[in-house]
Amino acid sequence: MKLINGKEISKSIKDEIKAEVEALKAAGKRLPKLVVVLVGDNQASQVYVRNKERGCQYTGMLSEIIRRDNNCTQEELLKIIDDLNHDDHVDGILVQLPLPKQIDEQAIIEAIDPTKDVDGFHPRNIAKLFLNEEGLVPCTPAGMMAMLDAIGYDLDGKEVCVVGRSNIVGKPVSLLALARNATVTIAHSHTKDLPKVTSRADVLIAAIGQPKFFTKEYIKEGAVVLDVGMDRDENNKLCGDVDFEDVKDKCHAITPVPGGVGPMTIALLLKNTMKAYKMRG
Ligand SMILES: Nc1nc2c(c(=O)[nH]1)N[C@@H](CN(C=O)c1ccc(C(=O)N[C@@H](CCC(=O)O)C(=O)O)cc1)CN2
Ligand SMILES: [Mg+2]
């Protein structure tokens, strides 16, 4: 069994970006800048946002965090986004999710200038993904493709089963796999006989948010397993959607949690910020 080390792979991506930033610096050019907007006091979000800032610092890109408390209104947030959309020094805008209840997430996503939408969640970027056009691709799905590239795994003709149909993971990763000529099945909470469906998959993408849900009867012998879960087990320990210990000997390759898909999300965010910078010229 091969452990797909997201920490290592993400470091090599960050090192490439770092070298690009150093070249920009040496040429006396303006540097790429990411602005992250964090609303409220969600503990996990605080950690992720800090990691995004650290990622920027590592690569030498500029970053700023705009914080607002739980009572922030939709109007306030829309005003912040409008200002960032019009700020020429800002290349990437990311609003950390989830947002407090009073705010309509989709309205916020749609307010971001699509050329600065480094999350790739704006309908214009989703449409580009759908049409197989060049654009900003959601970071977690793009990170999973980068992991497959890193282990030299070709999706052409392979059976991929994505379990979970969220807008930020399940649906976009299905499109990316399809673009690589995989035969894609999207399974979800209404799927009948889930083990029968998943155990056909050469690549299983687990994105349902249920701790250690996928045990070995869900896995095909020799499958590649990508675990997007960020869950807590019975001892409140961080774990994925896959029961790693139960399935590991049955897999060809598997991502751990932590240290798998998570760190890739941050690396691909930095890559998207560099891409947005270049697209904006
Ligand atoms: N605007 C966005 N909001 C959210 C996104 C997103 O892509 N854009 N995704 C998730 C959270 N997320 C990034 O924002 C994220 C989650 C987890 C990790 C990560 O590196 N996890 C570590 C473990 C961290 C820990 O100890 O808790 C790992 O897996 O090793 C990075 C990014 C929802 N919101
Ligand atoms: Mg909401």
Image (spheres, helix red, strand yellow):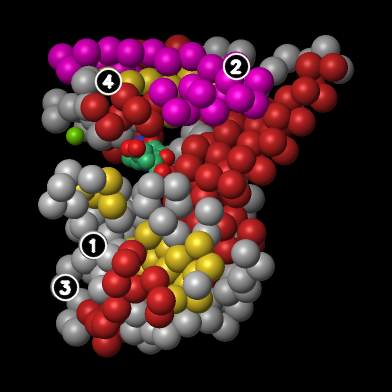
Q: Quadrant of residue 184?
A: bottom left
Q: Which residue is mark 1?
A: 212
Query: Residue 105 at what x, y percent from top left?
Result: 27, 34
Q: Which sits in the foreground, 217 or 111?
A: 217
Q: CA distance from mark 3 to mark 2?
A: 44 Å
Is label 2 within 8 A of ligand 1 (CB to nearest ligand atom)? Answer: no
Q: Which comes before the other along the chain, label 3 or label 1?
A: 3
Q: Which comes before the other along the chain, label 3 or label 2?
A: 2
Q: Which comes before the other along the chain, label 4 or label 2?
A: 4
Q: Amino acid at mark 2?
A: Leu
Single out the mark in the foreground, 3 or 1: 1
Residue bounds of the magenta highlight:
50-78
* Residue 100 visible somewhere in the drawing: yes
Q: Which comes before the other along the chain, label 3 or label 4?
A: 4
Single out the mark in the foreground, 1 or 4: 1
Single out the mark in the foreground, 3 or 2: 2
Q: Report the residue at 18% width, 27% height from top.
A: 100
Say whether marks 1 and 4 touch (CB < 8 Å).
no
Secondary structure of residue under mark 2: strand
Q: Which residue is mark 2?
A: 62
Q: Report the residue at 57% width, 83% height from top.
A: 157
